[in-house]
Structure formats: structure tokens, C-alpha cells
Image (cartoon, grey):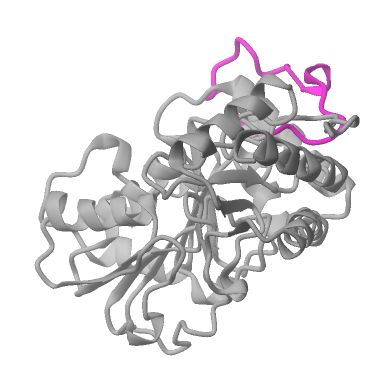
Amino acid sequence: MQPQAKPLNPNFSSGPCSRHPGYDIAHLDLSTIGRSHRSSVGKAALSKACRQTAELLGLPEGYRVGIVPGSDTGAVEMAMWSLLGQRPVDVCGWESFGLGWVTDIIKQLKLESTRIFKADYGELPQLSEVDFKHDVVFTWNGTTSGVKVQNGDWIADDREGLTICDATSAVFAMEMPWEKLDVVTYSWQKVLGSEGGHGMLILSPRAVARLESYTPAWPMPKLFRMTKGGKLIEGIFKGETINTPSMLAVADYLEALAWVESIGGVSQTIARCNENYKAVAAFVDATPWIDFLAKDPATHSTTSVCLTLDASPEQVKQIVKLLDAEGVAYDIGGYRDAPPSIRIWCGATVEASDVALLMPWIEWAYKKIVG
């Protein structure tokens, strides 16, 4: 029978993601709207965004946080174009965006001393074979595959190269071993459910030392330049952005950070993601025709939860459309390059009660379409 109760919030998109519970645009501090980002109020807001991010995440001493253009993609590109080329590179790819970094390193930067570690959707490559005398580029959580690295134990403490980590759907959702990560990137639109367009770039002192001691052989676009006269442009990491940001988006991000602080900090955003994932896992465990795309339970993402069904690709599409038409779940179709699947965003801004209410609707839609 068709379930009666629907999720109160049907927004399960993996980006831009659902707003946090109680979100009201009226709560935004709009004092910066119409003001220059270089004005005192503009600088104060941008500086607060960087400073509060570092405080909430508990970043180690000396780590810097900057707001950069182009969302997470812009932040990763900025790091790769600015830092790579001094050492050989090991790059890991097991889903669309990680494989995109492989393409950029090989075909755009044309780095010849590169080793590629690939895996099919649902699996991780052999991370134990990574050489940390090299620079290492990898994704913490595969947003399009639902496969994450379990922890940072595989990263050498005595690494000689830099670790560059695309963590767009992991920061604020998963424990991050900051001391083992030299570059970390994410976007506001993922776990915090804020706006897209801006990326966050976190640099360790080792990454800063590389920037100040190494000049890439290729021309550097203005949007990627982080040094001047061989020294880091410190202002970038104090809110003096390279180009003009959306001050409305900044106000929205600050409101999201305030929500994180109000619920008890990052430990609570991580806990919320875990509870959301558990609601899906309980349904999968009890249902024979659905499974996680990630093969190893230890690698199951707790944010971008990707599920395969015993159904044809067309039937999967019909199930997604039916749930959309019923106003139960929006934007849960698997990523275009992924195997036929559904993808349920279980980030911190989603309520576990809504995830639990969605599960019987998936069963209803499956039986209606597949039989």
C-alpha cells in the first residue's frame, strides 16, 4: 500500500543540498549587501567566515583557510596548478570528480612523472601502494559513488610529498586527520547546505612552504595566484578574496556556521550524518532487492549514499520520477556517469526522521514499477 506519511522535507539533492532545519532567509545578516567586499564591513564578514571555519573544524596551528572562486572544483584546480610539478604525483580516482583530477594532471598539466590508481565505481584503489615521497591527490568521499576512505591510517606520518584532498562532501561530516592533510577543499553547498559558487581552500604550513619555494613551469591564471614576490599572499586567508565574492552567499555561509555552533559543533554534524546513514542502512539490510553501490561497508559514505536496485536502468529512472511526482524525494537520481542507481543525500542538514520516512516510499515505488 502507498505510505501515508511523507518526509517533511523532500530535498535529498547531493548539491546544492538541503538547508538546515529551521533555516529562514530572514535570519541572514544583510548588513554587507550593497557594500564593497573591501569595505570594513565586507572584510569583517569574510574574515569571520575564514576564522570561524578554522575554529569549528579545530584546525591545527598554522593552517590557513581561504575563500576562493569556483566552488570545490575551483579550489582543487587552484591547488593542483599552484603546487604540483616539483615531485612525482600519485593520483587516485574512483568516481567522476576524482577521475577528473586524473584527466587534468595528465592532459592539462601534462605531468609525466604521474602514477594513476583507479578503481571501478563501488570500490577503492590499492591505497597501500601510494608512495608518499610523491605528491598525492585524492578524494576523501566520492560524491558520485558513495565510496569514502575509511580513515587516514594509510597516509604516512613521515610523508615527503604533499597530500591534496578533495573533501567537498566530507568536511563537517567525517573525522578528518588534519595533520596528515596538506590541502583540503570543500564547498559551502554540501554538508552545510549553503550556497554554491565559492570554495574553501585549507593549507597546511607544508603547503605554504611549497608555494613560497616553488614556481610552476606553466603560466598561472590570475584566479590561481597565491603568492607575490615569492611570499604567500596572506590576505587571501584573512578574507581578502582574489575576486569579488557574493556577499549574500557569504551571509548565508555565516548563518550556516552559526547553526553548526548552535547544535554543538562538528561532533554533532558528524553524528547527524551517521544517524541519517543508519536509517538507510537499516532499510537496505532488511530489503533483498537494494544494496549499496560501495562494496565494502567500511567505505560506505555517510553523506552521498548511493544505492543499486534489482531493476533495469529505465525502471530506476521511473522510480526516481515517481517519487518526485509524489513530492516525496527530489533529485535522487544517480550521477550521470555512475551505474544506474539512486543517490540519497544524508548530510548534516537532513533530518533522520525524513530519511526514515523516505524508505517505505522507495519500497512502494519499486513494487509499483518493477513488481
Identify the image quadrant of the N terminus.
Answer: top right
Determine whether 202 is above or below 256 in the image: below
Compared to residue 194, the image places residue 24 above or below, namely above
Residue nearest the observer in this picture, 291 or 278 = 291
Queried whether the magenta region covers residue 60, the answer comes back as no
Q: Which residues are magenta?
A: 18-44
Q: Residue furthest front?
A: 371
Q: Residue 97, percent across and down?
A: 38, 50
Residue projecting furthest to the top: 34
Q: Quadrant of residue 255?
A: top right
Res 41 seen here = no
Residue visible at 40% across and 39% down in the picture: 336
Q: Quadrant of residue 250?
A: top right
Asked whether residue 131 is in view, the answer is yes
Count of marks placed on residues: 0
**Residue 29 to residue 311: above or below:** above
182 and 9: which is toward the camera = 9
**Which part of the image, by quadrant, shows the C terminus?**
top right
Instruction: Answer above or below: position of 321 versus 172.
Output: above
Q: Is residue 59 found left or right of 140 in the rendered image?
A: right
Q: Residue at x 26, y 67 (%)?
A: 213
Q: Is residue 344 left or right of residue 71?
A: right
Q: Nearer the viewer, residue 100 or 228?
A: 100
Residue 349 is drawn in which quadrant?
Answer: top right
